[in-house]
Amino acid sequence: MGKDQTVLFHSTIFGPIHSRRLGVSLGVNLMPDDGKVCSFDCLYCEAGYNAQGAGTTGLPLREQVRSQLEAKLSRMHAAGDPLDVITFSGNGEPTLHPDFPHIIEDTVALRDRYYPEAKVSVLTNSTMIFKPEVAEALKKADNNILKLDSAVEETMRLIDRPNSPGFTVEKVVEGLRRFEGTGIIQTMMLRGTHDGIAIDNTTDTEIEALIAAYKRIKPREVMLYSLDRSTPEEKLVKVEKEELAEIGKRIAEATGITVVNA
Ligand code: SF4
């Protein structure tokens, strides 16, 4: 577990990080500074397994997030620094924060004031979309990036390991449909083994199931990505760029939805 700890974000506001895809992105971590809180426990989580614990700092309060974000944005603005996007990610699932809807409102207001051209993006694992206030808040973000790693129940449970037995593929696909074309579905493509069990969400059966799910959800976009950094389960294999592109092409042709390979 030691190495997993090193990839935690140790503050509420982090960055900005420069990436070719997102541009200049300022990160917001609504989870603890020294632990992880998530309703999934993905084998590939860059923040490590949930077993490391929630740390000691607790969740930042709404007012702390607002004032720290404002301080950072005003400093960047005064310095003439560019900003393309404010991204909610961090040490776990941002929508688990009890004040998530208000924090999104504050963030949109601060964005409008300091960087009206910048986008607000939220990376979410889709477990909280059944709460109307969370769904509404997500719709206020410019990009709500919603996780769907497999449309096969057994595979989703193996890869994402949801805390709740009540969270099912059928339920989440139904919930994702309610975003009515405003959401971006993000799928991590991978293969490997965990506890001796083979995992592969790139097989024909898996891709066909994903295609059927994407057709039902009708998202604005599908974003495929693959492993980038070290993962808590070390027996996972990266799906290389060329293969990811082929899978993306197949999905785009079958669904008519724009597929981006991140
Ligand atoms: S949903 Fe995200 S934060 Fe949660 S375990 Fe999976 S990768 Fe990690």
Image (tube, helix red, strand yellow):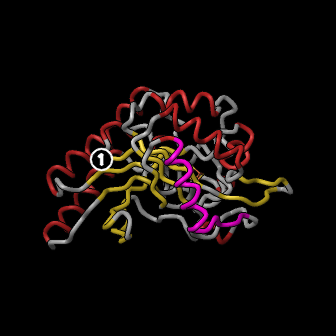
**Above-or-below relation of 22 to 53:** below
Name the residue nearer the viewer: 60 or 259.
259
- Residue 171 image offset from top left, x and y in percent: 59, 28
> Residue, x 51% and y 29% (percent of image)?
175
**Above-or-below relation of 1 to 162:** below
- Residue 147 image offset from top left, x and y in percent: 53, 45
For this orientation, the residue located farthest to the front is 253
Image quadrant holding the N terminus, namely bottom right
Is 250 included in the stretch rendered in magenta?
yes
Position of 255 with respect to 137 (left or right) is: right
Where, by quadrant of the figure, is residue 72 drawn? bottom left
- Residue 160 image offset from top left, x and y in percent: 65, 47
Is 137 included in the stretch rendered in magenta?
no
Q: Label 1 is placed on what type of residue?
A: Glu
**Above-or-below relation of 102 to 45:** above
Kindly state the secondary structure of the residue where label 1 is placed: helix
- Residue 253 image offset from top left, x and y in percent: 51, 47
Residue at which label 1 appears: 63
Callout count: 1
Q: Is mark 1 within 8 Å of ligand 1?
A: no
For this orientation, the residue located farthest to the right is 196
Name the residue nearer the viewer: 27 or 242.
242
The overriding secondary structure of the stretch rendered in magenta is helix
Please give the range of residues in magenta.
236-254
